[in-house]
Every structure is written in C-alpha cells, then in structure tokens.
Image (cartoon, rainbow, N blue to C red):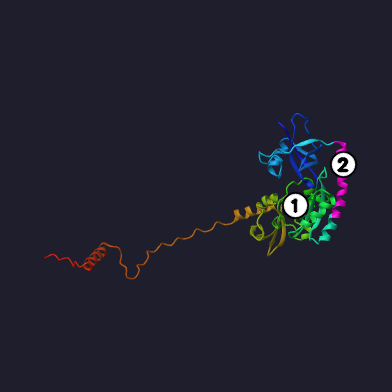
C-alpha cells in the first residue's frame, strides 16, 4: 500500500500525495519533488501516514486523495537532491524582483490591485501572482504582457488580507511569528463578540492583528470564558449578602473575584467562594414567609336573566318549549 504524506510549499500551501510502497518510507522535513500542474514542484514533508490522512479529511482542500476515483492520485516523484534544493533557493531569491516587475506592469495598466507575492513553480513552467483588491479586476491584458515577459504560464490569484498575512508572515503583538504563518492551518471567523465575552478593550488597535482584522487568538480561550462565566453572577444583579443588598458591578474570571457595590457601605471586592457562603448564610437566616390566608371562594352570582339549574326551572323551560312548538299547555288534572 502506498504511503500517504502531506507536502508543504511556500506560503502555507500544502497538499496530500502518495509515495510508492516499495521505496524507502519518507520522513518529516524530507525535501521531495512532486507532481504539479503540468509539471513538477518542490516541497517538504510535514506529515506522514495516519496523521496526513486525518489532516486531509479535516481541513485539507483540493488534495489528491480527496479527488474523484477516476482521477489519478498525485504522487511524490522522488526525493530532492542537493542540486534541486539549490535551484529552489535561487528561484525564491529571484521572486522579489519578479514581484517588482509585476507591480510596474500593474501601474502601467492602471489596475486597482495590490500585488502581495509571486511564486515560481520549481520547473519554471508556471508563475503564480497573488494579489488583493477591493473590487473585481479585469487583468486579461496584464496576463498577456506578463506571459510575454517571463515566457511561461501566468496564474493570478486574488486572496484576502488574512491570507496575505499568512503568506508574507510577520511578528505579532505577542512577539512571536503569526499563528497563520506557522501552525494555524485553518482561518476560522472571528467576531467582536469574542472580545466582549472576555472583557477586552474594544479599541481596534488593541485587538487587531497585522492583517487589520481581529486577532485569531481571541478564539483560543473563548470557550473557557463562556464556561467559567456560568459560575459567576451576572453584572447588574442584586444579591442578598452579609451586608444586605449589593449590586454586582463586574466579575474577574481569572482571579475569581466579584466587584460589589452597596448604597450604604460602598464598593468592595470579594472572592467568589466567600460570596457564595455569604449568600447561603443570608438565605438560611431569612425568616420563613407567612403562609397566605385563603379566603372562602364565594359562589358566583347569577347573571341577570338566568335562573338556577333546579328541577322547577327545567320543568318551566320544557313547558315554554312546547308552547313555542304549538302544543299549548298540558291539561290540568281534574279535582
């Protein structure tokens, strides 16, 4: 059975490939040459075996294993040699000059697009240009000029600002490299509600990353905050404590403290466990509520024009019904 491996390329781009079973198994960080679009490409192994299959099933998009059965699966052609790695490094060093030339062509055509990166395929049979734009861009003339300049196939890909940050990488507010450029394989949506649940500052400069969008790390601890908040009273609630009625002003989940305010004693900070003990003590010392005195329920007064349901009333209704039908009153018995 062929070995399944995950190969990573430039800019966090990756794919799933097969390696022949009769050959020596591949290991992590091995440099390989794989089948690519009408050619070959250079990459490194980032996962093997069951780990690669799980990644393909969960988050990998467009992998060779997930294609239709009729399509031949992409394979690893061979291990990369020292010459292959040297050629790959030379291509990477020249990609910045390629990007500058593309930018000049974009300005010459007057297109509203920002060129983020350029990537050569290892065999130089394709050049991929990544850009961002606010609107749809007609770059057909640009592609023809670039194809004539570089003598290869040109592929322009429009990406978002978060994908752009993942490709270019950088250092975040924490002092470490961007998560999306290192280990974060899937960019999940992040909204402002995550910052509100964690009581963070809503200043955009404080909760935004290098891409200008909300920080991806806001989602890491959100589940912890939501679960822990269930143990605390809600802000604005009135509690009966040892000092009487106090209002919950705020809660500190990490230190497990509650900020209370009383009209007589003013504000104070109390641990959550102590607050629960005071509430239980206040509930136990409260005198029991007096039982309500139930008044006897009076019979409802008859409505005007109605008669109580007695035998005489029913007999009179029957006689009235016979008179309406024309039967008249029954003969009275002779004395």
Query: Which quarter of the rendering shows the C terminus?
Result: bottom left
The answer to whether residue 88 is left or right of residue 275 is right
Indicate which label's residue lies in the foreground, 1 or 2.
2
Number of numbered discs overlaid on the protein picture:
2
Q: Quadrant of residue 261?
A: bottom right
Q: Is residue 16 visible?
A: yes
Q: Nearer the viewer, residue 114 or 229?
A: 114
Query: Which quarter of the rendering shows the N terminus?
Result: top right
> Residue at (84%, 57%) from the top-left corner?
103
Q: Position of residue 54 (x, y in %)?
A: 70, 39
Q: Is residue 94 a member of the stretch shown in magenta? A: yes
Residue at the spot of label 1: 216
The answer to whether residue 130 is left or right of residue 299 is right
Determine whether 26 is above or below 104 in the image: above
Give the residues drawn in magenta, as a range. Answer: 81-101
Badge 1 element = helix
- Which mark is on residue 87? 2
Determine whether 152 is above or below 287 in the image: above
First in sequence: mark 1 vs mark 2: 2
Q: Nearer the viewer, residue 170 or 168?
A: 168
Q: Is residue 171 visible?
A: no
Task: Decide whether the magenta segment is chiefly helix, strand or loop.
Answer: helix
Q: Position of residue 204 (x, y in %)?
A: 77, 60
Q: Position of residue 9 (x, y in %)?
A: 79, 44
């Amino acid at each position: 059975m062929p070995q399944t491996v995950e190969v990573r390329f430039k800019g966090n781009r990756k794919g799933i490939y097969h390696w022949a079973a009769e050959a020596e198994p591949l290991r992590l960080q091995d440099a390989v040459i794989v089948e690519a679009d009408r050619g070959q490409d250079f990459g490194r192994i980032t996962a093997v075996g069951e780990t690669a299959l799980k990644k393909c099933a969960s988050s990998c998009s467009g992998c060779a294993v997930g294609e239709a059965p009729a399509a031949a699966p992409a394979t690893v052609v061979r291990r990369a040699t020292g010459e292959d790695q040297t050629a790959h490094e030379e291509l990477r060093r020249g990609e910045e000059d390629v990007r500058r030339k593309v930018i000049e062509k974009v300005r010459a055509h007057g297109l509203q697009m920002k060129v983020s990166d350029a990537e050569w395929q290892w065999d130089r049979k394709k050049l991929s240009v990544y850009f961002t734009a606010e609107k749809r861009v007609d770059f057909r003339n640009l592609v023809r000029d670039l194809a004539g300049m570089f003598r290869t196939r040109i592929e322009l890909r429009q990406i978002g600002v978060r994908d752009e940050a993942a490709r270019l990488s950088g250092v975040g507010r924490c002092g470490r490299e961007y998560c999306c450029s290192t280990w974060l394989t899937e960019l999940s949506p992040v909204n402002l509600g995550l910052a509100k649940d964690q009581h963070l500052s809503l200043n955009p400069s404080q909760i935004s990353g290098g891409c200008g969008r909300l920080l991806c790390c806001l989602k890491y601890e959100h589940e912890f905050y939501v679960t822990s908040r269930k143990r605390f009273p809600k802000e604005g609630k009135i509690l009966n404590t040892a000092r009487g009625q106090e209002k919950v002003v705020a809660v500190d989940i990490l230190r497990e403290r509650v900020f209370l305010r009383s009209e007589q004693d003013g504000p104070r900070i109390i641990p959550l466990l102590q607050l629960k003990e005071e509430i239980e003590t206040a509930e136990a010392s409260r005198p029991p509520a007096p039982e309500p005195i139930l008044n006897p329920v009076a019979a409802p007064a008859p409505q005007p024009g109605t008669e109580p349901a007695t035998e005489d009333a029913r007999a009179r209704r029957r006689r009235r019904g016979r008179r309406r039908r024309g039967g008249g009153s029954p003969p009275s018995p002779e004395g």
